[in-house]
Image: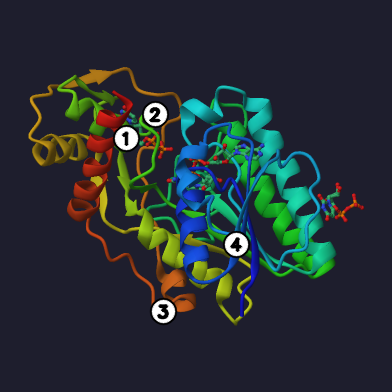
Amino acid sequence: MRKRILITGGAGFLGSHLCERLLHMGNEVICLDNYFSGSKQNIAHLLANPYFELVRHDVTVPYYAEVDEIYNLACPASPIHYQKNPIKTIKTSVMGAINMLGLAKRVKAKILQASTSEVYGDPEVHPQPEHYWGNVNPIGPRACYDEGKRCAETLFTSYHAQNGVNIRIARIFNTYGPKMSLTDGRVISNFIVQALSNKDITIYGDGNQTRSFMYVDDLIDALILLMESKSEIHFPINIGSTQEYKMIDLAKKIIQLTGSESKIVFKPQVEDDPKQRKPDTSLTQKVLPTWSPKISLNEGLTRTIEYFRQEIERQG
Ligand code: NAD
Ligand code: UDP
Ligand code: UDP
């Protein structure tokens, strides 16, 4: 049966992949975005599809539509973007969640929140299970994002408890792939752009900090499975890869895969930068037993490098 699905932040990196997949599965998709960090180009190829609708709208403002499902992805995700206007970032997470939950309550839609591993802050528990409450500095430079996302989780949980809204919360770990913006500022896009132009690869700090990277297609599989799960999973679920890498090793890998002549340079450490990050996926395996990431880092990086090569050429 064709569902009508609202995707906020649909013109962003992850949102555009989700729009494409859900349309492909035979659904009707409303893509809502204010283009703060996304772009029309990401979804331009979908505009001719009669089941696709593009709406310029800001989630901090109420929105009315009849929909069956809502994926709430609106929020800048790269530190340089979300720190540009911290108050706006908090409003987007908090007021955006309130408005989308109000909409879900009124039309009885199922609603999924794109939460983040950043709710664990600079974690003192490793790997991070969902029952770990985290270590977030509430007044640091990352707080607008981390605390906004934490409050959104609280709102989702409260709308479920108080109003019976059918919610899902995905705690997404670092995800990469084609359609990340060249100027996004996150580590994989920075390193690939630097490597392809033979510029210095910038490591913030000593490069021993770790992240676990998941390819975008694996994430999209998980989000749809979580949304469609028949059992009511009204609590946060980690979605991420358990393959953990040091940034110094990531830099070397990207230099090797691109055949670049770039040198690695070390820049000052970023304030409150988490030192390590890797999901404990015990609960994920229980609630999504058929899912695990399929694309290796080598394969995913190769595809992403190819995309960036074409984009650099296209943008001149
Ligand atoms: P992105 O910046 O490419 O996409 C975010 C989209 O939201 C953009 O298109 C942007 O224009 C839109 N947006 C921002 N503020 C808005 C507002 N007030 N109203 C309407 N639209 C607005 O980032 P992404 O990587 O695609 O992330 C998507 C979601 O997934 C975000 O909520 C992010 O926090 C979450 N997430 C991403 C990752 C990751 O590694 N990519 C990890 C954890 C969580
Ligand atoms: N809201 C929305 N679309 C709707 C229904 C509600 O954007 O279709 C907004 C509404 O404007 C409100 C918020 O969602 O600010 C929360 O709605 P709720 O019904 O929970 O609370 P109330 O309307 O009582 O503030
Ligand atoms: N990073 C880096 N060089 C860059 C961009 C990022 O060394 O050019 C580091 C950053 O300090 C962090 C890691 O890479 O330790 C991941 O950063 P990103 O912004 O991609 O994601 P997040 O910190 O939100 O996980």
Q: Secondary structure at mark 2?
A: loop
Mark 4 residue type: Tyr
Mark 3 residue type: Pro
Q: Which residue is mark 4?
A: 51
Mark 1 residue type: Ser
Q: Secondary structure at mark 1?
A: helix
Which badge, 1 or 3, comes first in the chain's sequence? 1
Mark drawn on residue 207: none
Q: Which residue is mark 1?
A: 189
Q: Nearer the viewer, mark 4 or mark 1?
A: 4
Ligand 3 within 8 Å, label 2 CB: yes
Image quadrant assignment for residue 104: bottom right
Q: Secondary structure at mark 4?
A: loop
**Residue 10 in sight in this render:** yes
Ligand 3 within 8 Å, label 1 CB: yes
Quick check: marks 2 and 1 in contact, CB under 8 Å? yes
Q: Which residue is mark 2?
A: 185
Quick check: marks 3 and 4 in contact, CB under 8 Å? no
Quick check: marks 2 and 3 in contact, CB under 8 Å? no
Vertical relation: 137 (above or below) 154: above
